[in-house]
Amino acid sequence: MEMSFEESLAELENIVEKLENGQLSLDESLLLFDTGIKLVKECDTKLRNAQQQVEKLIEENNCLKSEPLELLDENSHEK
Amino acid sequence: MVFEEKGIYTVHEFTLAIKGILTGSRLSDVWIRGEISNFTNHSSGHRYFTLKDKGSQLQCVMFKWHGNNLRFELEHGMKVVVLGDIDVYEQRGQYQLRVRAIRPDGIGELYKAYEQLKNKLAMEGLFSPEHKKPLPEFPKRIGVATSPTGAVLHDILTVLKRRYPVNILFMPTVVQGEYAAESIVHSISALNNTDVDLIIMGRGGGSIEDLWAFNEELVARAIFNSKIPVISAVGHETDYTIADFVADVRAPTPSAAAEIAVPDRQELCNRISRLGDRLTETQRRNINDKTSYLAQLKAAIEPGLLLDMVSHHTQYMDDLARRQNLSMQRLLEVKKSLFAAHAGKLDAVSPLGTLSRGYSITLKLPDKALVRSIDDVEERDELQIIVNDGRIKCHVDYKEVCKWK
């Protein structure tokens, strides 16, 4: 299962701390390092690819629904 | 009812006639401004008071079912605007105003009402830090409850887009006027039924009257009861509404609310790259440490040292071998001379000498037992006779005892 961004970030911080504390065998540290580098890339990609998505909540027959909200042009607000 | 010249009314009939005229008039559903005096909050739940100004007084009653919506408690001397209908209290022949709603009149009174509610809710613990819910560090979906027309939504979306693009669920909400409080309460509860993990509730700046919905008790309670953390962003920096005190976090402006709601993407990127740096730096140091430790170990088993150790052992081995040879030689020599001595002795007693002199040795077969006596053999036994230069195999034909000596 894919980790969420915050899970990835927390895991990355955890790995860096473990490595900084030492006390690991070379094999363990290499394995952690490898995972850490992957997480750095993963977090970075997720962050850069994040897109804003705006929906509007509507109520129909006592049911909640949402639909994409069409954003007005920036100028229309500056009155 | 028509007045008839000759007819005589009872008091009650007359009172009813007056009541008919008054209640049929346009004196219903009117707003009246005045100051409260003689206020009694009856145990029945109905409120009685006199509304007065410099020139006149007006008896007022506010029945319990109307008073339930009152957002502040009446006080003597309070300036108010009341909404009501004219009525006649028949038993006392008194006209009075049946009050349906009361609003504080003027900013001073609004502040008084505000202070009243603030103190009440503070006493109840609605503002206590232990009730504040922590905000998610990385919200996935943010519910925004605000007006669809104001700049607030736009401001929030702009900041969110710049800082950290996140999914937004917008709940159009009335934030000013008669229906604002109910609309805000409704929005909060509707958003509580969605998957948003944070709610921003806001409106732009305005007068205390404009912001009043956010000072309503039911709005405060809706925020307090929200299971999802709420950031309030009502008015400008200096405006503090009751909603701000109840909210989990109060933002000075809608833009600030958006900034509080999400982390900054650039900062996060920096944080991740710092983590990456720490990761490689640590690992580099880690490997350096191990390499130098390895070098240390290697130095400890340096080849020269090993060779030294080997040659030392070789020498010792050589020494041992030499000593072993020497002692073996000595041992052999001793054994050799011992052997020569024994061989001489043996020669002297050897039967071989006897054989050469013409004697023989008789052995009984098959076990080659030495025959010493006539009793050692029976007739037909097989014998072997050893002479000086060979062996003779023969049978016993006959035996006879003789005494040679």
Image: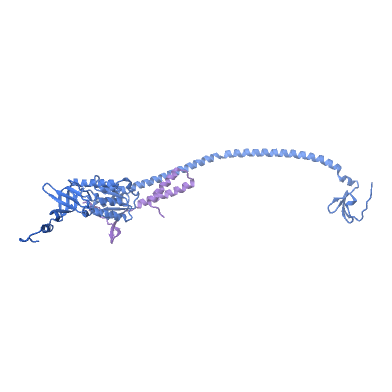
Chain colours: A purple, B blue
Q: Nearer the viewer, residue B113 or B273?
A: B113
Describe residue B394's horizontal placement relative to residue B147 as left or right.
Answer: right
Of the 4 image quadrants, the one containing the N terminus of chain B is bottom left
Describe residue B91's horizontal placement relative to residue B156 as left or right.
Answer: left
Describe residue A12's horizontal placement relative to residue B79 as left or right.
Answer: right
Q: Nearer the viewer, residue B242 or A52?
A: B242
Q: Nearer the viewer, residue B337 or B60?
A: B60
Q: Is residue B200 above or below residue B322?
A: below
- The answer to whether one can see residue B313 in this image is yes
Q: Residue B67 location, x and y as percent? A: 21, 52
Describe residue B327's horizontal placement relative to residue B166 as left or right.
Answer: right
Rendered image quadrant of residue A1? bottom left
- The answer to whether one can see residue B89 in this image is no
Q: Nearer the viewer, residue B153 or B321?
A: B153
Q: Residue A72 location, x and y as percent? A: 25, 55
Q: Residue B154 location, x and y as percent? A: 26, 52
Q: Residue B402 location, x and y as percent? A: 94, 50
Q: Tell which residue pokes out farthest to the left in this image.
A: B5
